[in-house]
Image (cartoon, grey):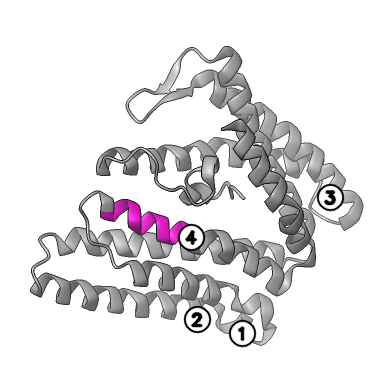
Amino acid sequence: MLRQRLIVTLLLLPPGIACIFLGGGWYFGLLLFFFLPAAYEYAQMMRRGGHRPALPLIVGGTFLLASAQAAPAFWPVLQPVAGTLSGGMLTLLLVVATTWHLVDFERGAPASGTDWAITVAGMAYLGWMGGYFTLVRALPDGLSWTMTILPAVWFSDSGAYTVVSRLGKHRLSPRLSPKKTWEGYIGGIVWGVAFGALFGALGSFRAGPESAVGFRSGAIVGLFVSLVGTLGDLGISMLKRQVGVKDSSNILGAHGCLCRCRWQGRF
């Protein structure tokens, strides 16, 4: 499994880093490369659990919401109506999702209310978050912020795994994820803060002395993503336990669930 993880990482990392540095449509395309399969696997996971979410709406809604959120970053003329644009798109998708599941109920679906909630949750979570990743990159110091946030996430995750494999004894959430431990959680926080501070300091050299990016802000970002990142993992574990599946995806082999792209941004 470790070998598969390494191979996938080596294949995806160079083009991924290039897209981050290029920004614009390249970066948005990179996000879609991960978020759209994440939307697909989320819908498929819930279907394997006996639910009937609207797969086309979840995937299409993720794309439309992310695009509506990101549009002002590409066309500054839209910035005054950014909230209206994204809010209007969300409202439209809610209406379409409601119509879809009302029709599905009339055709015999046993739990359309639950299916509607699953559909809306998938669109909103993945689409809304995907748009915000683009907005962060579009900030004046967006490249420095992005290259502070993502390494903090990656190293926090690696730190948790390293500590768990060596020192993990006390389970963090035995029912949801028996392999997660308090030692790993704390180790992930330490690594996230340390590498967030490091990459924040490196980013400050590029952004300049007047930028908010720096050692202290990087440490704060690392602390935040480390604290909340585990919630994303546990949330996916909760869904998997509820629908009775072990693995939610094989799209990236040993890297497992693309839905875990959460705020951590696992890509």
Does the residue at mark 3 contact the one at mark 4 (Cβ under 8 Å)? no
Circles 2 and 1, Cβ within 8 Å, touching? The answer is: yes
| Chain-order first, disc 1 or disc 3 | 1
Numbered badge on residue 37: 4
Q: Quadrant of the N terminus?
A: top right
Q: Residues within 10 Å of mark 2 (few under 14, many from 20)?
A: some
- Disc 2 versus disc 4: distance between alpha carbons? 24 Å
**Horizontal relation, residue 5 to residue 204: left or right:** left
Q: Amino acid at mark 2?
A: Leu
Q: Which residue is mark 3?
A: 203
How far is disc 4 from disc 1 in space, using C-alphas?
28 Å
Query: Helix, strand or loop at disc 4?
Result: helix
What's the magenta region? 38-47
Whole-percent x and y of residue 147?
Answer: 75, 51
- Residue 168 in the image: state x and y as whole percent: 53, 15
In the image, is residue 77 above or below residue 123? below
Say which residue label 1 marks.
78
Q: In front of the other: label 4 or label 1?
A: 4
Q: Amino acid at mark 1?
A: Leu
CA separation in Å, label 3 and label 4: 31 Å
The foreground one among 260 and 135 is 260
